[in-house]
Image (cartoon, coloured by chain):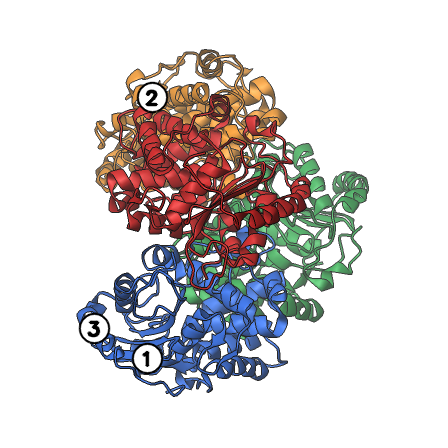
Chain colours: A blue, B red, C orange, D green
Amino acid sequence: MNEVLEERYDARFWQSRLEDLVEHYRPFSSSGRNAEYIPALGKIDSNQLGICVIGSDQTMIKAGNSDVSFTLQSISKVISFIAACLTKGISYVLDRVDVEPTGDAFNSIIRLEMHKPGKPFNPMINAGALTVSSILPGESALGKIESLHDVIEKMIGKRLEINEEVFRSEWQTAHRNRALAHYLKETGFLEADVEETLEVYLKQCSMEGSTEDIALIGMILANDGYHPFRREHVIPKDVARLTKALMLTCGMYNASGKFAAFVGIPAKSGVSGGIMCAVPASVKREQPFQHGCGIGIYGPAIDDYGNSMTGGMLLKHIAREWDLSIF
Amino acid sequence: MNEVLEERYDARFWQSRLEDLVEHYRPFSSSGRNAEYIPALGKIDSNQLGICVIGSDQTMIKAGNSDVSFTLQSISKVISFIAACLTKGISYVLDRVDVEPTGDAFNSIIRLEMHKPGKPFNPMINAGALTVSSILPGESALGKIESLHDVIEKMIGKRLEINEEVFRSEWQTAHRNRALAHYLKETGFLEADVEETLEVYLKQCSMEGSTEDIALIGMILANDGYHPFRREHVIPKDVARLTKALMLTCGMYNASGKFAAFVGIPAKSGVSGGIMCAVPASVKREQPFQHGCGIGIYGPAIDDYGNSMTGGMLLKHIAREWDLSIF
Amino acid sequence: MNEVLEERYDARFWQSRLEDLVEHYRPFSSSGRNAEYIPALGKIDSNQLGICVIGSDQTMIKAGNSDVSFTLQSISKVISFIAACLTKGISYVLDRVDVEPTGDAFNSIIRLEMHKPGKPFNPMINAGALTVSSILPGESALGKIESLHDVIEKMIGKRLEINEEVFRSEWQTAHRNRALAHYLKETGFLEADVEETLEVYLKQCSMEGSTEDIALIGMILANDGYHPFRREHVIPKDVARLTKALMLTCGMYNASGKFAAFVGIPAKSGVSGGIMCAVPASVKREQPFQHGCGIGIYGPAIDDYGNSMTGGMLLKHIAREWDLSIF
Amino acid sequence: MNEVLEERYDARFWQSRLEDLVEHYRPFSSSGRNAEYIPALGKIDSNQLGICVIGSDQTMIKAGNSDVSFTLQSISKVISFIAACLTKGISYVLDRVDVEPTGDAFNSIIRLEMHKPGKPFNPMINAGALTVSSILPGESALGKIESLHDVIEKMIGKRLEINEEVFRSEWQTAHRNRALAHYLKETGFLEADVEETLEVYLKQCSMEGSTEDIALIGMILANDGYHPFRREHVIPKDVARLTKALMLTCGMYNASGKFAAFVGIPAKSGVSGGIMCAVPASVKREQPFQHGCGIGIYGPAIDDYGNSMTGGMLLKHIAREWDLSIF
């Protein structure tokens, strides 16, 4: 457990409810399938589904395969974006990557050529995430990764291990990411070397966490960067808000619009099946979690957009039941 | 005035503050310029700037050129989308238009050819708005427009007049919209005739309202379709929420991402210089407008994206000062 | 017959050979199918295959369904291009349409938006052909069409009738062409009204000719515009050469490159199944047709690119057997 | 000199004419400029202009800076295509690269993503040329390059040296080519490793030849692969013809259509300023070179398309004066 969290009485009701929902949606895993372009992900049991919700009031509820470790994949894009903003400043970062959603696939290269001078549209697609990884502080891949560990430690009080097997698997098959990185090198947006950038990017993708870890990060973002348990600001408010806006408009690949429309929560998914959500406090909401919460979900069978199939269903269900939408 | 609104005591302070801000930002009009592709808009005094804020608590404050009538242009896309959902049902509408932001210009046609079968990406770009106008109930342009008047009347208690001069001006220069409509006719997404659809679409764009009119609509959306003065639901909650999500992800042309990131309010702009905002209640906000509000802005000088230059600046300022962001 | 042509003795041998080849390739019609987007074409017997070859030496040989009348469709683009060059001058025409092949489908609209200012890439794709039709002399559709009849009469000594049924069929389903025309109207490349241009374009597409008619035009082009029977220049040499270059690089839709590579003859096809070829004289060629020839082919079953399935096979065969390639 | 060529009497007249034309066009070098993306090319005297014409009858005429050595750059794409066809067979090669012109820039990546499965459109653009280099025989870069030397030696009787300085310069700045190669690796079209392929490709680009060398290759292609001096076939006829068709439709970057239209000769250019032409024999042509010829041109100042500015002008002039067009 990341922090000492007390399990409150009323959480038991919600935990039981979550358990029911997890078992209800788990069978739909068969409609999706594990990401195949990363060989190491193909081997994982696609029937898993787990969730962890951490409230701003220190309530934590978990259900299903909530303690499984999985690689963050694109969820790490949120962390590297925060780390870049913290170390280089928001304006430095936004000079190199825009914050516009695209409607294109996460690994699309078309827009870099179609729109001069080829500035990546946002940091949640691969082109933008590679650019962000390249501007992290540190003269080497190691140094840049350390800056990611720093920001993670600030938020969840520990480092996340890099799964070397997944990293090597991704490294060897990263042809599309190398194509994007070389393209960005030519247009001048990539500040570090291509290979150094790829090492940083693929290692951040290979960091392993649990639903609890990402729920905690989501909860801190929900609180505008304030860590309610530690009673300190770990991320500046403007960075936290900008990050949530990006998650809402660009966080769920090219289903982000549909996710905003039908779930309405700032969220970031990864092809390994994780989804990290930041649910701000709401005057409308009765209970639970009227003071906001973070949600971490894991379900490795993904849909055509790259989002967890059952994770998305579960999230849509509780967003409606608990009235979590920010709209 | 749309409704009998009492001007509260504390509103005087905020009114004065708004007047100062309007005069502060008005000179920046010279950095933008009136939309040129619609000849009738070119003649308007580009130095105007007005704002109206209507709180869920019936507070209304106005400043600057808040009473000028202007054509809704793309703001009408919100109204036609609501009207289509009310009359045909959400799922019928979303079978014909998606809800994904694109990053492309509002009048772009590329994506219709690149993505089979050419379903428009969202109802806030022209391709999607034309599709929505074509599915409105009614066997003629007149009937379809009547369905728009109905939903407007439901919300603001009156009809909005169509500016015939602007309509004729747009009708004669609508080459790009005709191109889009014919393309959509070929792919089968346009249900009505091209000319009938264009008449509906261009007439809805030519409807005239004031900042107060659009602020009231925004306020109703902020309240999930509930009209707090009349104490009745005029728009179903799910339609209102879907509409706000669309406004946030797609409402400010291809600056929607930047607007979400730096303002954080569901909003829809038009090239005539209007911006309609729906600000939900927030537990975080102290005052004013902690119970939510609608904001109407008018400033005809637009920026490169098609959004009001000074209107955007003013909105960004008060969003920060009053903590209006939904994130 | 267009002209008094003497059937030479040795032509009998080649005629017999052509008859054999026609019957050999005719059964492959079942692999293609009639153009479906023009309803009137769907009804035609797709098993037809005919050919007419007219040599510069006045030899004419025919085989199969060579006397069937069919609508020219895109073959008419060659005629309107020639007519525009004759009446407005090459440089006037090329200011409005480029001569670059695209690799895109004939009805593609993407490139008009991707490349500012949206100049059509060549007159053999619809965007370019519409532009060309719009600049023909004459203040009305009638006048413009008359200029096409003029150039046709100059070449083949008679007018080609317009098939009104096909024209009406195309007129009603011309959504994509209307989209293109309106787009070109907005960017300023279309000089005439959209509807006038469409009438000209669709009427030229609906002109009916036989394989003999188009073979004769092809033969004149093969002779650089010189009509060897009449012993007069009916098309200026520079226009004829430019036209042949365009046919070779852009004439067979987005299979033009493959056609240049494996057949090597300037040719223009239409979705009705016609192919018009201009085979220049060659020092390499033994016989027949060492002094050049025109070839007209008709086979209504088309392939995925829009070219006659059996017509293409037959042409490839005789191009190889008779060594007709210009390379 | 590649071969013992006798300078004929009448060649003196044409040589003098060429000298005049070279001096006439040389000053236009100032309208173009050396390729900048390859640093080593930037240093070269941009005022140079040279030409060599070798007739099938063993006539050779030269003018201007005809003996300067320059790197072949994209001219080498013709050689690698021929080498691949000779060693792997035409159908093997065309399974991996199409022969359609694109209208896009030589280094464009868009089409690989837009058209599934991403088969390169032709071997004259970088995506196609990289694919071709990857399928050359040999288990290493060295082996593959040796296969290029073999085919060159077959044609011109000698090896072309690799300019190591240019190679290193290109190797370090080849970001865009690396992007293309990695993209092609992901889609499966690149058969060799990315780095091995790039080494082959950039070394073939860095091979140095003179106008005489490329004129000789052009002359052999003009003769369908037959070497008239040696009286032997060095390239199969079908490969030679296919190559000439490709040169005509795709050889002059995205000005290929214009070049076909206004010059009408199969040609391939390189950004170093070379142009290689294959002029087939023609029954129309009086003199000189009625039996066909090869032309080599060198003028390092290039235009916006990447073709030699003065070289193109000179070629257009003599194509018209000597009636060299194949149309």
The picture quadrant where one finds residue C271 is top left
For the residues beneath circles 3 and 2, the answer to whether they share a chain is no
Q: How many labels does the image show?
A: 3
Q: Please, which chain is the residue tagged with disc 2 on?
A: C
What is the number of the mark on residue C210? 2
What is the number of the mark on residue A287? none
B243 shown above or below C11: below
Q: Residue at x 44, y 16 (%)?
A: C156
For the question of whether residue C119 can be seen, the reply is: yes
Residue position marked by numbered label 3 in the rendering: A17
For the residues beneath circles 3 and 1, the answer to whether they share a chain is yes
Q: How far apart are marks 3 and 2 (CA)?
A: 76 Å
Q: Where is residue D156 in the image (x, y as percent from the top left)?
A: 62, 59
Residue position marked by numbered label 1 in the rendering: A60
Q: Distance between the residues labelled 3 and 1?
A: 14 Å
For the residues beneath circles 1 and 2, the answer to whether they share a chain is no
Q: Please, which chain is the residue tagged with disc 1 on?
A: A
Residue type (three-letter) at the residue carrying disc 1: Met
Residue type (three-letter) at the residue carrying disc 3: Arg
Residue type (three-letter) at the residue carrying disc 2: Ser
Q: Position of residue A34 (x, y in %)?
A: 29, 71
Q: What element carries label 3?
A: helix
Q: What element carries label 1?
A: strand
Q: What element carries label 2?
A: loop
